[in-house]
Image (spheres, rainbow, N blue to C red):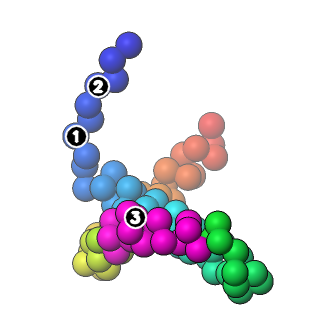
Amino acid sequence: MIPHQIEQTPSTAVDADARTVVEAKRLLRRLATVLVTSPFDEHAHAELLAFLTTGAAEARAAWGRLNALSDQELTAKARGAVLGAAARGRK
């Protein structure tokens, strides 16, 4: 089966940006914890360097796009998330 290409709506773009930022923050938090407890962990240093060279720019761009949203856009997004969660809870 060939998946259909779905055009990204503004809402899914915000979701993707939020997911990118959350994943980057989790990775950095985990690496920071490892490096504080074991400052010479070569694997953690290599993983951090790999993130900085490949994923950091994307995460920074996603963070910038999220910060550029207006209050109305953020309110609409939050309202949609709450209503979606409520609808899933009723099922």
Most extreme residue toward the top is: 1
Q: Residues within 10 Å of mark 2 (few under 14, many from 20)?
A: few
Q: In front: 60, or 4?
A: 60
* Front disc: 3 or 2: 3
- Quadrant of the image containing the N terminus: top left
Look at label 1 and name its amino acid. Answer: Glu
**Magenta highlight range:** 45-60
Q: Is residue 17 left or right of residue 89?
A: left
Residue under label 3, please give it: 55
Q: Is residue 91 above or below residue 58?
A: above
Q: Position of residue 3 (x, y in %)?
A: 34, 23
The dot on residue 4 is 2
In contact (CB < 8 Å): disc 1 and disc 2: no
The dot on residue 7 is 1
Look at label 2 and name its amino acid. Answer: His
- Structural distance between the alpha carbons of marks 1 and 2: 10 Å
Q: Is residue 62 left or right of residue 49?
A: left
Give me the residue at 42% from left, 72% from top: 52
Q: Position of residue 34 (x, y in %)?
A: 71, 76
Q: Is disc 2 placed on a helix, strand or loop? A: loop
- Quadrant of the image containing the C terminus: top right
- Structural distance between the alpha carbons of marks 3 and 2: 27 Å
Q: Is disc 1 placed on a helix, strand or loop? A: loop
* Front disc: 1 or 3: 3
- Structural distance between the alpha carbons of marks 1 and 3: 23 Å
Q: Is residue 23 magenta?
A: no
* Residue 74 visible in the shown view: no
Q: Can you tell which quarter of the image residue 16 is in?
A: bottom left
